[in-house]
């Protein structure tokens, strides 16, 4: 049933031929959980949260199905977890609403919730109920606690908190700040959909270091910025052979329908990047940080910091399950002659896997990119035989930019679609 406020909208609904749907939170549940990691040249299963495993082990009869596929004390694993913590800004935060406080008050005082509608609880009772709710929240498993941040980072911090404390780790290695004319500038680059990564400059004094850049984001935006990789605690050259291993892990995780993120860092020597005097250009960094391929290309730019020649720590993947029965809804649209298109910023293997799960991509083995890259077909041959195609957002942006000068009524505008 559809309730329409404006009758003119009925005509639009009746003539709908295509629905473009966002993926995260619409087709999927927007509940990200860490699933796999690739660290120290190994793929490891991270689908079980350490806290959940530890609580299970304390039971009289532990559930044998709850096991972990990683070693919590492994130095390479812990280095990856630390890099994820220092490369995120999501925090645990739960601020109970007045309605939640009223519901708890009703249960505690054994009164009907309806009797409290339209009324305010006494201030002291409101404080007590909210304090109880927050206390109960802190006792939950990390995977169920509320966070302030996006879904991907929420999944990361819920996993990492069980391995090492977010607050303690970030306090030990705080985000660097510098002061100009009495105003503090925090050295970070927030995530955005156009750059697909974020960046922090952290003070590594506790490790007897100077400053370190931490960058986290989509593999296609991070891997090509790395010239080294961390293996057994050493930074070694990121050779083509090692790149192939990382790309395979990235592809394997993507084919499972998981969102993949890469994490890298770069140390900054104190003689060049002084904590006391260097002013980092975190405002106009796009003028030099996006266009070049090496730190040497912008070494003379005032306020620059390393955004290339990074050291890859590893990659992590997160699972976001489809919403229940969304595949049936897509099938109903298709039966009604309505084409459904999924819009996502995920890389093509991940997008194709999720599209298959929700019934948008019926035959994943006949997807254009798969036939070209995995089966070795020519683009012409694959196009003639494929039944679906995943178009990456970067390609859309590139095509759109080339046609931006064309007027909207030009028949050639958007023809590539």
Image (cartoon, rainbow, N blue to C red):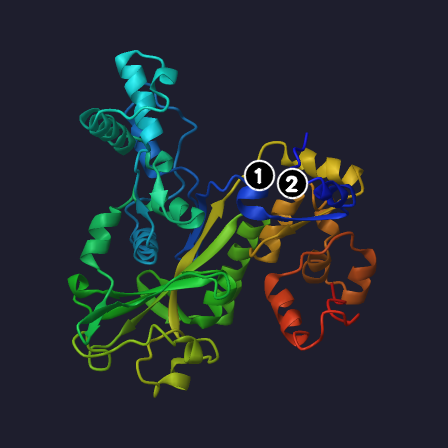
Work out whether residue 326 or residue 273 is closer to the camera in this orientation and state it. 326
- Give the answer, above or below, for where 305 lies relative to 255: below
Q: Residue at x 44, y 40 (%)?
A: 47
Badge 1 marks a residue whose secondary structure is loop
Most extreme residue toward the bottom, as rendered? 300
The quadrant of the image that shows the C terminus is bottom right
Kindly state the secondary structure of the residue where label 2 is placed: loop
**Quick one: label 1, few (<14), some, or many (20+) residues within 10 Å?**
many
Q: Is residue 76 visible?
A: yes
Which image quarter: residue 65?
Answer: top left
Name which of mark 2 and mark 1 comes first in the sequence. 1
Task: Answer with the quarter of the image where residue 184 lies.
Answer: bottom left
Q: Residue at x 75, y 52 (%)?
A: 366
**Residue 378 in view in this figure:** no
Distance from Cα at disc 2 to Cα at disc 1: 7 Å
Pick the front one: 130 or 76: 130
Which of the two residues, 107 or 214, is positioned nearer the viewer here?
Answer: 107
The answer to whether marks 2 and 1 mark residues whose Cβ atoms lie closer than 8 Å is yes
Q: Is residue 62 above or below residue 347?
A: above
Identity of the residue drawn at 54% across and 46% down: 24
Q: Is residue 204 above or below residue 302?
A: above
Residue position for label 1: 322
- Residue 108's label in the rendered image is none
* Residue 365, image x, y percentages: 72, 50
Q: Residue 185 location, x and y as percent?
A: 25, 69
For label 2, the residue is 358
Pick the front one: 371 or 306: 306
């Amino acid at each position: 049933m559809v309730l329409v406020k404006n009758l003119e909208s009925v005509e639009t609904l009746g003539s709908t031929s295509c629905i473009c749907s966002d993926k995260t939170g619409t087709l999927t549940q927007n509940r990200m959980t860490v699933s796999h990691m690739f660290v120290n040249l190994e793929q490891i299963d991270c689908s079980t949260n350490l806290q959940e495993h530890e609580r299970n082990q304390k039971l009289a009869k532990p559930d044998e199905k709850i096991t972990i596929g990683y070693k919590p004390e492994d130095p390479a694993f812990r280095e990856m977890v630390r890099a994820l913590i220092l490369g995120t800004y999501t925090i645990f935060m739960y601020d109970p609403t007045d309605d939640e406080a009223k519901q708890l008050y009703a249960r505690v005082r054994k009164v009907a919730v309806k009797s409290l509608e339209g009324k305010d609880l006494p201030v002291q009772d409101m404080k007590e109920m909210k304090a109880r709710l927050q206390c109960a929240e802190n006792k939950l498993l990390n995977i169920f606690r509320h966070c302030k941040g996006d879904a991907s980072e929420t999944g990361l911090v819920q996993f990492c908190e069980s391995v090492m404390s977010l607050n303690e780790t970030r306090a030990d290695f705080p985000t660097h700040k510098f002061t100009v004319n009495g105003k503090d500038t925090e050295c970070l680059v927030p995530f955005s959909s156009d750059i697909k990564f974020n960046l922090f400059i952290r003070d590594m004094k506790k490790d007897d270091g100077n400053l370190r850049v931490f960058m986290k984001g989509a593999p296609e935006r991070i891997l090509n910025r790395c010239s080294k990789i961390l293996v057994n605690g050493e930074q070694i050259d990121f050779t083509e052979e090692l790149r192939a291993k990382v790309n395979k892990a990235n592809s394997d995780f993507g084919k499972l329908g998981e969102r993949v993120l890469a994490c890298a860092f770069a140390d900054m020597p104190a003689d060049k990047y002084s904590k006391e005097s260097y002013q980092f250009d975190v405002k106009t960094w796009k003028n030099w940080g996006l266009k070049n391929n090496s730190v040497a290309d912008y070494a003379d730019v005032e306020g620059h910091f390393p955004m290339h020649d990074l050291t890859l720590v590893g990659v992590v993947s997160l699972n976001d399950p489809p919403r229940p029965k969304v595949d049936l809804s897509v099938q109903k649209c298709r039966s009604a002659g309505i084409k459904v298109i999924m819009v996502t910023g995920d890389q093509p293997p991940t997008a194709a896997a999720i599209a298959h799960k929700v019934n948008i991509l019926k035959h994943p083995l006949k997807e254009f990119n798969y036939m070209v890259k995995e089966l070795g077909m020519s683009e012409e041959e694959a196009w003639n035989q494929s039944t679906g195609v995943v178009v990456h957002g970067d390609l859309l942006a590139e095509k759109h930019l080339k046609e931006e000068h064309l007027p909207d009524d030009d028949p050639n505008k958007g023809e590539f679609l």
